[in-house]
Image (tube, rainbow, N blue to C red):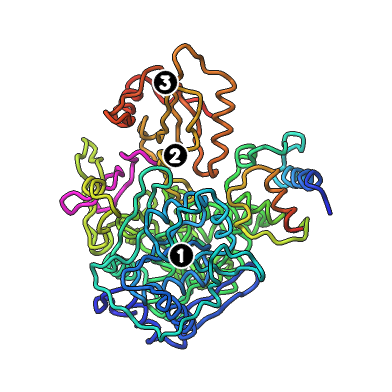
Amino acid sequence: MPTLRDTTEEVLRLAAEHFKVPRETLSVNDDFFKKLGINSLQALDLLTRIEQHFRIELPDYELQGVSDFRTLAERILSRL
Amino acid sequence: MLDLRKYQSLGEALRAGMERWPNEICLIEADRERENARLTYRQFSDAALALTSGLQSAGFKNGTRAAIIMTNQSKWLISAYAIFYCGGVLVPLDYKLTPAEQLKLLEHSWAEFLIVEYHLWRAIAQTPDFETLRARVVLVTEAPVNAELYGAKRWEAFRGAVAPTFVARTLKDPACIVYSSGTGGRPKGCVLTHENYLEQCMALTSRYPFWPGVRYLSILPTNHAIDFMVGFIGPFTCGAAVVHLRTLRPEYIREAFTRYKITYMSLVPMVLKNLEKGLRQRFLELPPARWKMLSALIATNRALTRRRPNLKLSRALLKQVHEAFGGELRALFVGGAFTEPATLQFFYDLGIQVGNGYGCTEAGTAITLNDFKPFRADTVGKPLPGMEVKITNADAEGIGEVQVRSKTVMSHYLDDPEMTAETIRGGWLVTGDLGRIDRDGHLLLLGRKKNMIVTEEGKNIYPEDTETVFEGLPVKEFCVFAANYLWPERTMLGEQLVLVVHLETGTAFSESLAAEIAERNRRLLNYKRISGYLVWDRDFPLTASLKIKRIELAEQIRSAVGRSAMVML
């Protein structure tokens, strides 16, 4: 079972890759809407990428109220 | 469609639809590539009547208030019909609100029954304010086996011992209490009558008719005024079908168009822009020769439909584009927020009509809508049948406040006669929006008089509703404003909220205060966040009961500093 730290690291890597920004510019507590300048639909796009990577299904509502990478990683971990 | 003039209530009209088209499909629920449910009007009615029996056995009476908190799915509509069948008043709440906000509105509405999805219910039950919940019967949908139900009952197993009885209501009785704001401040519960909805439905379907075989794709939550009308009442009183998609992801929306041969769809500007972006990207990827040919066809279509749309011609000219939308698409409806004219023009040039309109919860759903005679991207169209629109206190350019009079205007704000009197004056609804009516009778929106913003996602945000999160900030006083209210601009795009802080005497603005503002801001849902702050050096004007005189404070700020004084976060 991966740890929260591993999962967060993977999420950061996927986000950097998906939105084409250097990985080192992102950190766990970043507000991804603000940091990446994205809207909720673009965040859903990232969710799809995450689902493919972790082979899980995350309903749209899992993103509700989530705006930082750490919380997102927690939601993923609970479904692994 | 049914002749809605014959009916006294939504329950009665919906029941007539069930009886008229028993074997037509009325509802499909899709989740990604899966199909969860496909119901005929008869099956839908049977499911709703089983629930009705349960509700009536549990003491649901004429006028009982029942709230629904759900994402858009089949059980939302089944539950709503059951509530109307019992003569109840529906309180549709936004599932995207926080549990604390939902509890506040549940308390204000005095809803005795609550129907809610399990994951949302679990969050509500774990909220510190849970004991304020007044609902005496809670039904949860899709609760996992052995789940802790926190006193709720399972929707799927909720049955009664009595035969369901239809309860008649009259046109002037309340049908719904819809909250347009007030999660943090003063709740604005719009009491909308059966007449309001039936009139709105007749007005909209006169412009965009539904009939058996029409398929409406629903991606907006059903609590949203547009989807409630165009994705429920409209199609269900015309024998049409609704396809609920339980995800907003663009790839599944695209797939749903082709799989279900969608006729109509409603969306908010953000989703429309995303569709535009996707199409533009696909055009860019075309080989140069094909792009050249497509550009020529688009130009031809634009020239041939300049005066009026011609769907048949556009479908023939731009076959591939229309096939990507399933080949049956007649129109997209966009609302909830201001849409950029360039986006509307982009779709119109492809032969895809976008019904661009303007409305507000207090006036039902839509007040104006584009009539395509001819297409105009710069306006929000003309008043719908039965709507009177006037501009008051117009300036030299004819710009003033938009007021509306129609049978679709709400009855009142729940338990707030003072705010009702401020909003409905002499039978006219004061919208707080600024606009002008041009020579052709089109309404152009040019800003707001009221202190609020609307996001691209169609969310109305009132500054007061965001202030709770800043309580305890180490400053003397603070207040949140819409930036456009402080410094009016003639646009409804890119609206922002600004936090005004007045520091304690002898203190200076510090980095730690900036960090605390940013941290507290992050506790708000992303679309509710402030964009910046303004440090103000004078005492706020206060009322005798020490409330901030917002209008006066705004005037002081406006006359002293400009928008550039705002520090962006």
Say if the magenta span includes residue A69: no
Q: Is residue B77 above or below residue B442?
A: below
Residue of label 1: B114
Give the CA separation, mark 3 to mark 2. 21 Å
Q: Residues within 10 Å of mark 3 (few under 14, many from 20)?
A: some
Secondary element under disc 3, as helix, strand or loop, is: strand
Secondary element under disc 2, as helix, strand or loop, is: loop
Q: Residues within 10 Å of mark 2 (few under 14, many from 20)?
A: some
Residue B82 image offset from top left, x and y in percent? 41, 75
Identify the disc placed on residue B495.
2
Q: Chain of mark 3?
A: B
Secondary element under disc 1, as helix, strand or loop, is: strand
Name which residue type carries label 2.
Glu
Q: Give the extent of the magenta segment.
A: B424-452
In the image, taking residue B541 as reference, residue A58 lies left or right, namely right
Image quarter of the N terminus of chain B: bottom left
Q: Which residue is found at the position 72% from the left and 37% from the top? A: A26
Whether residues under marks 1 and 3 lie with C-beta atoms below 8 angstroms apart, the answer is no
Q: Quadrant of residue B381?
A: bottom left
Residue B497 image offset from top left, x and y in percent? 45, 35
Count of marks overlaid on the render:
3
